[in-house]
Amino acid sequence: MQEVHQQPEKVLVTGISRGKDDFDYTMTELVELAKANNYDVVGELRQNLDRSTAAFYFGSGKVAEIRELALAHDATTVLVNDELSPSQLRNLERETKLHIVDRTQLILEIFANRAHSKTAKAQVEIAQLQYALPRLHPSANKLDQQGGGGGFANRGAGETKLEMDRRVLNKRIARLRRELKEADVGETVRRAQRDDKAMPTVALVGYTNAGKSTTMNGLLALFADHPETKQVFEKDMLFATLDTSVRQLTLPDNRKFLLSDTVGFVSKLPHTLVDAFKATLAEAASADLLIQVVDYSDEHYAEMMAVTEKTLTAIGVHDIPMIVAYNKADLRVDTHYPEVNGDDLIYSARDHASLEQLTDLIKTHLFAKDQTNTYLIPFAKGAIVDFINRETSVSATDYTADGTQITTTVNPIQAGQLREYLIE
Ligand SMILES: Nc1nc2c(ncn2[C@@H]2O[C@H](COP(=O)(O)OP(=O)(O)OP(=O)(O)O)[C@@H](O)[C@H]2O)c(=O)[nH]1
Ligand SMILES: [Mg+2]
């Protein structure tokens, strides 16, 4: 995998508007993405065009202008705000004699630099290889040597036969897929759930840097099942989290749920990445409840929410109840928090009262179908009494001549498991 650039490489950021409302925001974000990959942004060039041109993406005249601006600023690389077609990429490289990195490739590079676990590395590499496949070209090797190419397997001299290159890449993709299947990402959750199938699951989702991991850590600090439960990694940077973490939480009334934290989204998230990360994101797709964490202090939060909704649909999330959690309210001068509005919450992940409010909302959703019942457990069934004490929210215990009588709040699955002992 490619290392973070040692000496920041000077780059231009470029894009065409295509008459889209979110153009400004995606261009601003492109600069952030560039910084996240340690590029030094020295200039920007925009063109107002209704549509990109098939040959160069930019309209006539702009290509020469890019070259001049790059020369004037010593820039060696040009970042483009969209995914380019293979021929647009080739033509632009040829005409400008500069290294062209489109938005997809940039995001792939960031992911590659951030990936630590074997799973994340394999998922990113699959996405990179799929991006590279249609772009394989006899001249591709030459371009790669200009640096910053993103660690594709088609590096190196002497690979002239396109067919052979394709075969090598496809073989590598197949191998990585096999390895991923063996590692089985979904296993994390299933292992956690195996002990108690009745445990509901909650997934934190949302834009990158919104505060998902900070929210997870806040809830863990309050309700982690064991004091030694590990906190997750949180940091002020794009795509801090690439791996899914699942932790068990136990509320003061003894009710439990599983909370998961996973990779964040960004606008125009490459579809090869969405595909490659499907297994990791499956967490969200199978949750009982989603918490969409929003950076409410960012002026573009509405666009970020729209992107999140779109990405959730793309990974196959349908009809899962959602709490919208407007985070970082502490950074807004005019906002009172915590404040609950129906299913939504304005809060700060660093604020105790906020986390309590969030917990209340989670409880309302997860435990709405709970029921309070009284059971009579024969003395011979001590294990059942243990189970009730461990897993449910007990309000009264009496010892009668016929056994232990317990009044407790159970979820529908537990109610089914305990039905034969029900007395009222
Ligand atoms: N001021 C303030 N900062 C916050 C709050 N919540 C999170 N942050 C900061 O925002 C940054 C990003 O937080 P993370 O929790 O890592 O964000 P994330 O959503 O997990 O991001 P990715 O893993 O990159 O998708 C960190 O520097 C946090 O300290 C908040 O309520 N107030
Ligand atoms: Mg995170």
Image (cartoon, rainbow, N blue to C red):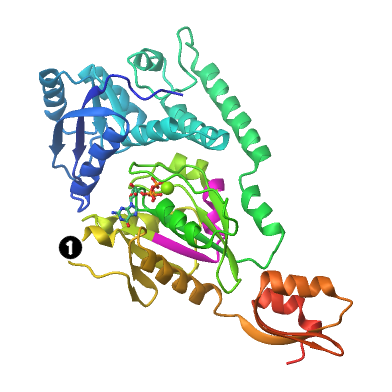
Which of 134/417 is in front? 417
> Compared with residue 145, is residue 21 higher up or lower down, i.e. above or below?
below
Task: Give the image location of residue 297, x and y in percent.
Answer: 24, 57
Quadrant of the rendered structure where residue 43 is? top left
Q: Say which residue appears at 68% left-offset and 52% top-offset.
A: 191
Q: Is residue 84 left or right of residue 355?
A: left
Task: Give the image location of residue 278, x and y in percent.
Answer: 53, 47
Quadrant of the rendered structure where residue 99 is? top left
Residue 286 lies in the magenta stretch = yes
Inspect this view and state whether residue 312 appears.
Answer: no
- Secondary element under disc 1, as helix, strand or loop, is loop
Q: Is mark 1 within 8 Å of ligand 1?
A: no
Residue 365 lies in the magenta stretch = no
Which of 264/75 is in front? 264
Task: Give the image location of residue 60, x and y in percent.
Answer: 14, 30
Inspect this view and state whether residue 393 appears.
Answer: yes
The part of the chain drawn in magenta is 279-292
Which of 182/242 is in front? 242
Furthest residue to the right?
380
Residue type at mark 1? Val
Furthest residue to the top?
158
Dividing the image into 4 quarters, which one contains the C terminus?
bottom right
Q: Residues within 10 Å of mark 1 (few under 14, many from 20)?
A: few
Which of 321/342 is in front? 342
Task: Give the image location of residue 155, x and y in percent.
Answer: 45, 15
Q: Which residue is mark 1?
A: 333
Q: Say which residue appears at 63% left-offset and 29% top-offset.
A: 175
Q: Is residue 163 left or right of residue 424?
A: left
